[in-house]
Amino acid sequence: DGGITQSPKYLFRKEGQNVTLSCEQNLNHDAMYWYRQDPGQGLRLIYYSQIVNDFQKGDIAEGYSVSREKKESFPLTVTSAQKNPTAFYLCASNDRGSQPQHFGDGTRLSIL
Amino acid sequence: QQQVKQSPQSLIVQKGGISIINCAYENTAFDYFPWYQQFPGKGPALLIAIRPDVSEKKEGRFTISFNKSAKQFSLHIMDSQPGDSATYFCAASSRETSGSRLTFGEGTQLTVNP
């Protein structure tokens, strides 16, 4: 089954701790995206990558970092600099320059 | 210029009724307008999408109406069912200015009462 796998489903972060969210896709898509979803708000773009070893900041990149060493993987690190990290994080992918975007089932991050 | 405004924030309809959700945009370079459906604890899934060369697209009970001059588009759900209860997001993108990046509306929580 082709799709996007996000793990873990739930994640808890202690104050001052960095945490990494995993996103893996087997759709052979070039482009991958990370979004943040807060209650009552739309999806806001954190980072995106159009090709391996390249990525760009989205609208709310502060306090986050990413890497794209493999086509199928695009992990997101929520750093201690992100002061309000509690949210639902969604990963998506598509063929570069085309639509639609396909989404994983998200990781819910909470603060301990 | 990149914003997409969505209304209403929440909507309650009776089973069998018509659900209507509206979106408005400013960026005239937008050339792709999808609607996504999201159930609790799940990622959004593409429901239906339209490009500005047509004014309407229908897939089953779901219809997108597109008004290029008004820069508005809407989702109509005919014969709404309790299983349609979900959050709906409109979005837009521009191949010219943003590639495949999507700008999302704020979402509409739809409840269909049995």
Image (tube, coloured by chain):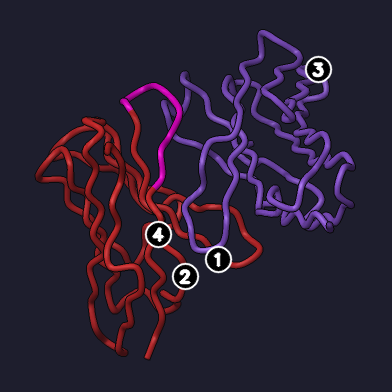
Chain colours: A red, B purple
Q: Residue furthest top?
A: B53
Which residue matches tag 3?
A: B69
Residue under numbered circle 2: A87
Q: Are marks 3 and 1 on the same chain?
A: no
* In this picture, residue B82 sits left or right of residue A71: right
Residue at disc 1, secondary structure: loop
The residue labelled by disc 1 is A38
Residue A3, image x and y in percent? 30, 41
Which range of residues does the magenta coloring cover?
Answer: A95-103
Classify mark 2: residues with Cα within 10 Å, few (<14), some (14-19) or many (20+). some
Closer to the camera in the image, B68 or B58: B58
Q: CA distance from mark 2 to mark 1?
A: 5 Å
Q: What is the C-alpha distance between the residues marked 4 and 3?
A: 36 Å
Crowding at dot 3, Cα within 10 Å, few <14 / some 14-19 / many 20+, comes out as: few
Where in the figure is residue B52, as x and y percent of width and height? 66, 14
Amino acid type, mark 3: Ser
Q: What kind of secondary structure does the magenta stretch mostly adopt?
A: loop
Q: Is residue A102 magenta?
A: yes
